[in-house]
Amino acid sequence: MNRVTLTTAMSALRQKLSELFSAQRAPAGYQPGRTLGQLRRNLGLARFEWVSPTLARAILDDDSLHLEICERTESQLLMHLVMTEFSLRLPASTEGAAHFELHHGGAIRRTGICCRQRTGERALLGQLQACLQPDSALHGALMLLDFKRLHIELHGRQWLVRLEHMGGSEVVNRMPAFRRYIALSRVQRDALLAVLAGLQRVLRTL
């Protein structure tokens, strides 16, 4: 490798390391745990345990649902967003690897729930859809729920559900300076818990 090539490679490496460091660095004005604390009040669950400033575990009062809730940030020009993600982990009856994404169908009005497979064996998609479609309670809650992302993943012998709601989030602007917390309403709170409970019910059959 000549000197020019080496210099170019080193420059590219420094740039990548700089980008990686910037991506991991918390945005200016971010207050870890602030958004999660406000979401805690929206949820109104007695069993809410802090694991770290940005991670908590919550359990329904009847012990039927165990959740992890974490904060994550997204930097934009002169502002940043703080989102909360709900995670549900369940044992799987079969071993494999797959990644599915659920979203609402319809451009203007919601016309249904679509399930898209990102990775994994195609046969798993049919099995998942066959369990999701007959569950009218789950379908109704999903149609009502204002979610941004809903992923179902299979890792070995464990299912992982990751759900990010549109509420329970915060917008922080630097110029002009303001903070706005987008609350999780009571209706959305109930729909959220119903969806997570429904997915737990469905995935336990797979």
Image (cartoon, helix red, strand yellow):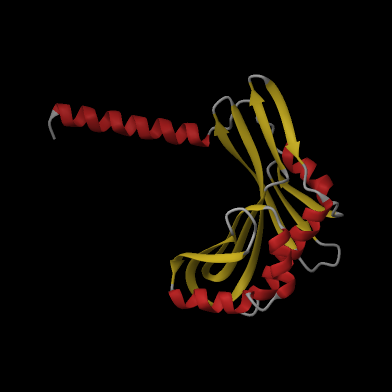
In percent of the image, x 20 and y 31: which residue is there? Answer: 6
Q: Is residue 143 visible?
A: yes
Residue 110: name its quadrant. bottom right
Is 101 rendered above or below residue 83?
below
In percent of the image, x 68 and y 43: which residue is there? Answer: 54
**Of the pair 107 and 68, the residue shown nearer to us:** 107
Query: How many numbered marks appear?
Result: 0
Is 40 rendered above or below residue 92?
above
Q: Quadrant of the C terminus?
A: bottom right
**Of the pair 28 and 197, the residue shown nearer to us:** 197
Q: Residue furthest top?
A: 176
Classify residue 117 as left or right of residue 139: left
Residue 50 percent coordinates (x, y): 75, 47
Q: Is residue 93 visible?
A: no
Residue 35: name its quadrant. top right
Q: Residue furthest left?
A: 2
Residue 171 percent coordinates (x, y): 67, 34
Residue 78 percent coordinates (x, y): 58, 24
In percent of the image, x 77 and y 47: which residue is there? Answer: 184
In percent of the image, x 86 and y 62: which residue is there? Answer: 61
